[in-house]
Image: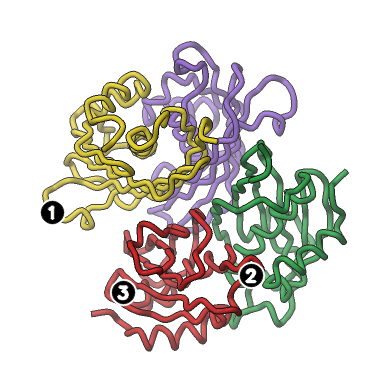
Chain colours: A red, B green, C yellow, D purple
């Protein structure tokens, strides 16, 4: 069982990541070491060219991995991002974005996660990868 | 001589990176392959703990490197971020931030830049590193 | 159908990556955009502590992704590594290593791959992740 | 004063990084948080095309940063690489390589270093960058 459910994670996020507000992020599935969220694409989070900006996807990758840690670990909210690496793969389609975070490692001091972001147009995820990120967090209160 | 001066780069940024608005970014020095900018720290870009958030520093690293490319290359505005890697080194002091971007490579198809972000409290930059990033851009119209 | 089969890829590797010789790398499965290889662990590729060294895993990640590109693309051998990011997750068990490479993007100019390296002790891969890497290659002759 | 001098670091390396043997690495300058080494280019460390291979530069970046930590920290030899990010900037000239490692952070638990590798043909370093890497190490015995 995850430590927090989707509604609790969304409430936490609204408070801690105010810059995510405009993204309409919804947590769709959460279990230990895994979280999937949807960005409902609308006018206000698009830039002139009609796509989500790169910095928005960086923030999204950080946010979903952080929420996955919170869902998995007691006191996960103390985790601090120490490294983010992101590759932009192609421009998003004009559709919702899905971000899937998986924790590859959950050690006493470091957690490492992997995030795939893709356009949701109803077909296979692998056909529509938009960005892929890996992130490391230091876990201060964890021994 | 850079292709665009500080005032031109700031005007461009206000239009292309609306999310940078709240950062009060000022271009302090620009020459080919180099750009230094200052983030004037104020209440509105701080999060509860009193520090600039990680995603803000990611956006900052992307923004200053992109501006350095524009200052160096004709049609640099067509550059597209393909990779960003950032290490967060320590929490910023309650002071202005300085971001220095250097272009390590400027090839026909790819540009690679290096960004150091540090707190400006008047002493040596190396004493106050906050984050360090490397970024790659694809240059579509460049052969 | 892949452009080259396992035996052809192994023969190519022996010639182009002489430093892989001591690894006893065997290509176990190959299809377009995917390749899985096994490192048969033996005395000679272990360092004093009894584990595969970090630099060996970096070379392994580069090698399997490069072979996956060759298996997928005509003239893939011209691909040149431009970026590698690797996270070391835990020390390998004293067992064979499996490296799985997946191509996340195969554009005209850039290919991006994802590599998971894990110990093969017969249980779930996700239980034994050793390292995770992402790599970018420039594809010179590809338009 | 560094904790170990150049001769001590070279002796340690010969024992701990046997794969560096063929590189003829010489530590040219060492001080706390900084180390510069030279790779004397010879027939035996070149691959067919006449350049140092990518995996060799990854190992080089790891090696010099690790030595810089050992030169700076008591018990630095316990440091373990957790992340490496490297960008390959251009093919090396047929000349010696210089690798300069700088420690950007030296915290209780994590160290972060920055490595620039360039060809030494007698002119400015910035004219001949070959690769740039950033690395993170966990420091187990450091509280």
The disc, 3 or 2, on the residue closer to the chain's N-terminal end is 2
SS at mark 1 in the image: loop
Q: Quadrant of residue D18?
A: top left
Instruction: Give the residue displayed 21% in from the left and 31% down from the top.
Output: C26
SS at mark 2 in the image: loop
**Cα distance, mark 1 to mark 2?**
46 Å
The residue that disc 1 covers is C123
Q: Residues within 10 Å of mark 3 (few under 14, many from 20)?
A: many
Instruction: Give the residue displayed 34% in from the left and 21% down from the top.
Output: C18
**Cα distance, mark 1 to mark 3?**
22 Å
The residue that disc 3 covers is A72
Left or right side of C104 for C116: left
Q: Residues within 10 Å of mark 2 (few under 14, many from 20)?
A: few
Instruction: Give the residue displayed 26% in from the left and 25% down from the top.
Output: C8
Residue A119 picture location, percent across and down: 44, 66
Residue B108 picture location, percent across and down: 66, 36
Host chain of mark 1: C
Residue C49 picture location, percent across and down: 26, 38
Q: Residues within 10 Å of mark 1 (few under 14, many from 20)?
A: few
Depth check, mark 3 against mark 2: the one in front is 2
Q: Quadrant of residue B38?
A: bottom right
């Amino acid at each position: 069982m995850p430590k927090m459910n989707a509604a609790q994670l969304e409430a936490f996020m609204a408070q801690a990541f105010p810059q995510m507000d405009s993204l309409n992020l919804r947590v769709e599935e959460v279990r230990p070491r895994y979280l999937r969220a949807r960005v409902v694409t609308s006018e206000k989070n698009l830039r002139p060219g009609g796509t989500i900006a790169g910095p928005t996807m960086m923030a999204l990758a950080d946010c979903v991995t952080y929420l996955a840690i919170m869902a998995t670990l007691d006191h996960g909210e103390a985790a601090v991002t120490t490294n983010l690496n992101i590759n932009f793969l192609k421009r998003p389609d004009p559709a919702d974005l899905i971000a899937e975070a998986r924790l590859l490692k959950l050690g006493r001091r470091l957690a490492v996660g992997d995030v795939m972001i893709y356009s949701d147009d109803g077909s296979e995820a692998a056909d529509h990868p938009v960005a892929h990120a890996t992130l490391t967090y230091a876990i201060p209160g964890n021994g």
